[in-house]
Image (spheres, rainbow, N blue to C red):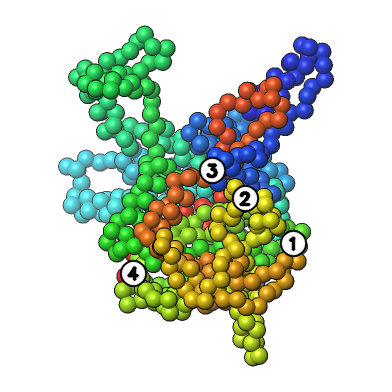
């Protein structure tokens, strides 16, 4: 993309006889007007920028120069791609021993296979005794089971094998930004091979759609407009006489994470749970803490930042999330659980967080102000003589203070039209109440004022939390009472917005028209979600 812009600028400069202008691809500061997902990232991450009509990574091939100065290309799923692209990680061109053993085993198994999947010579049934026939069938059955259990390595399993944490010294985990580039590159290669498979197997997966189109054409249900510049179909039976473009339509199945069918299936699963078990009662947001001891202790070098280890961040967050779900299913913080829906996404600053909706049993639903105050707090814990609240007080001041925003920081992410979208600072309230619109006003009494980062902080700036969960997990855990069923749709707007994106622009306006097509950015933190867990989940507890 940038090579085309650079080439055109060089040709134009040589033609006119002037110096080349500097061409720079940068983030558009006004991209947030297109949506929150298009806002500029807040952390310094490595990302892959590619031009695509459907937002999916294209299939790539690696071009290499041989000794005879001849160009040759190899597929991106070739095991030699990693040593050729990343010689610092693979200085000797080595491939991991696990991959070698799997490859040798696959070759040995495949060399003994004939067309029927059986290696013995074919004999006529009339020339075989019953005992020989039975032993042969048993041998064939065992060989078939061995074939089905055979492990064949692919790009994803190879990448997971490479980035696996071992006891030995690993240059990959000390690569910093280069390690982020390897993860992004591996993610793009994996997604590219998936889309290539779906492109080449449309007839097997969605043959019914093509059959219906052929039947419509054979029955003259559509008229072909051959005079149009682009071939199209116009419906003769439709009153609107709309035109449908001819061409090959690629359909992604619901098993492809991030596809429209997958998003719709997740949404329908959530709506089915709501229709059976009722609207949710608790809306919980759990954000990763990059200063967890599990993350700090496993970073091999003090020169490596937490953002340079997205695999470790995703892995620790998944373990913490599993522990959180175990406590919730046991009914420790909120009572007996009936159903739940959650989704994992990555913030603009590169940290994963989870949106969780909980539906409780009738006897545990928070109906009164006293029930809400038992599980949700929005105040700074006071200092105690025995020191029991001091740890919770430090965690609240570290993770649960909103801001700065407003006059202190008018360009904050939560600011729009000069106001905080989260409605901070809140109003003081002596007891928990509900306003006319159905929003809960938590108890925020006038009390102590704390100086934090040269700013006065009181209870109006505290985000609602659960004391038990906050003390145990030491992270930002926002807990809110769901006031209506629309909170489910609010949660799944994150599913429909797709992956994290950014708006880019070329600073030279004269040649900015060279960049055609939407620009998609894939960051290293979002790529690591594949190794952590599935992106979304919806289920009902027993």
Identify the mark at residue 338; answer none if there is no mark: 4
Question: Residue sitting at 71 percent across and 52 percent down?
Answer: 176
Q: Gap between marks 1 and 2, in whole Å?
A: 43 Å
First of labels 3, 4 by sequence position: 3
Residue 231: percent from the left, percent from the top? 38, 16
Q: Furthest residue to the bottom?
A: 386
The residue indicated by pointer 1 is 301
Classify mark 4: residues with Cα within 10 Å, few (<14), some (14-19) or many (20+). Answer: some
Identify the image quadrant of residue 33.
top right
Residue 164: percent from the left, percent from the top? 59, 58
Classify mark 3: residues with Cα within 10 Å, few (<14), some (14-19) or many (20+). Answer: few
Q: Gap between marks 3 and 4, in whole Å?
A: 34 Å
Identify the mark at residue 22; answer none if there is no mark: none
Could you say whether the residue bearing mark 4 is in a helix, strand or loop?
strand
Classify mark 1: residues with Cα within 10 Å, few (<14), some (14-19) or many (20+). Answer: few
Question: Residue sitting at 43 percent across and 65 percent down?
Answer: 435
Q: Nearer the viewer, mark 1 or mark 4?
A: 4
Identify the mark at residue 418; answer none if there is no mark: 2
Residue 119 vs residue 475, the one in the foreground: 475
């Amino acid at each position: 993309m940038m090579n085309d812009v650079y080439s055109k600028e060089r040709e134009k400069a040589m033609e006119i006889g002037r110096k080349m202008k500097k061409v720079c691809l940068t983030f558009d500061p006004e991209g947030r007007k297109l949506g929150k997902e298009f806002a500029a990232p807040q952390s310094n991450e490595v990302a892959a920028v590619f031009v695509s009509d459907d937002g999916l990574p294209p299939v790539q091939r690696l071009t290499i120069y041989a000794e005879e100065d001849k160009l040759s290309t190899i597929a991106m799923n070739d095991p030699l791609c990693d040593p050729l692209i990343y010689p610092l990680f693979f200085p000797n061109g080595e491939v991991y021993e696990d991959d070698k053993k799997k490859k040798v085993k696959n070759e040995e198994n495949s060399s003994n296979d004939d067309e029927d999947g059986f290696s013995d010579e074919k004999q006529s049934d009339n020339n075989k005794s019953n005992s020989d026939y039975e032993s042969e069938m048993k041998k064939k059955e065992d060989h078939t089971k061995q074939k089905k259990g055979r492990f064949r390595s692919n790009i994803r399993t190879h990448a997971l094998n490479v980035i696996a944490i071992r006891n030995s010294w690993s240059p990959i985990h000390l690569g910093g930004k280069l390690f982020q580039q390897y993860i992004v590159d591996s993610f793009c290669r994996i997604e590219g091979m998936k889309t290539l498979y779906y492109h080449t197997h449309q007839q097997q997966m969605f043959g019914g759609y093509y059959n219906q189109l052929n039947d419509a054409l054979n029955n003259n249900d559509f008229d072909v407009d051959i005079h149009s510049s682009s071939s199209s179909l116009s419906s003769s039976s439709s009153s609107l006489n709309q035109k449908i473009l001819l061409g090959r339509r690629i359909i992604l199945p619901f098993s492809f994470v991030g596809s429209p069918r997958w998003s719709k299936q997740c949404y329908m699963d959530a709506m089915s749970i709501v229709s059976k078990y009722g609207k949710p009662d608790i809306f919980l947001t759990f954000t990763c803490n990059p200063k967890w001891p599990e993350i700090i202790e496993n970073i091999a070098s003090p020169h490596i930042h937490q953002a340079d280890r997205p695999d470790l961040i995703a892995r620790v967050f998944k373990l913490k999330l599993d522990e959180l779900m175990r406590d919730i299913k046991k009914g420790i913080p909120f009572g007996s659980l009936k159903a739940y829906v959650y989704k994992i996404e990555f913030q603009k600053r590169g940290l994963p967080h989870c949106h969780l909706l909980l539906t409780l049993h009738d006897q545990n639903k928070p109906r009164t102000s006293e029930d809400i105050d038992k599980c949700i707090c929005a105040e700074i814990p006071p200092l105690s003589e025995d020191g029991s609240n001091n740890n919770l007080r430090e965690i609240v001041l570290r993770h649960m203070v909103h801001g700065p925003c407003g006059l202190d920081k008018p360009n904050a992410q939560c600011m729009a039209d000069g106001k905080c979208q989260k409605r901070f600072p809140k109003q003081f309230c002596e007891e928990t109440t509900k306003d006319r619109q159905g929003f809960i006003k938590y108890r925020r009494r006038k009390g102590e004022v704390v100086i934090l980062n040269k700013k006065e902080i009181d209870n109006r700036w505290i985000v609602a939390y659960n004391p038990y969960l906050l003390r145990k997990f030491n992270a930002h855990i926002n807990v809110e009472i769901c006031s209506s069923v629309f909170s489910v749709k609010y949660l799944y707007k994150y599913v429909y917005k797709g992956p994290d994106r950014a708006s880019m622009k070329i600073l030279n306006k004269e040649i900015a028209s060279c960049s055609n097509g939407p620009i998609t950015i894939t960051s290293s933190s979002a790529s690591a979600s594949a190794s952590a867990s599935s992106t979304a989940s919806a289920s009902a507890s027993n």
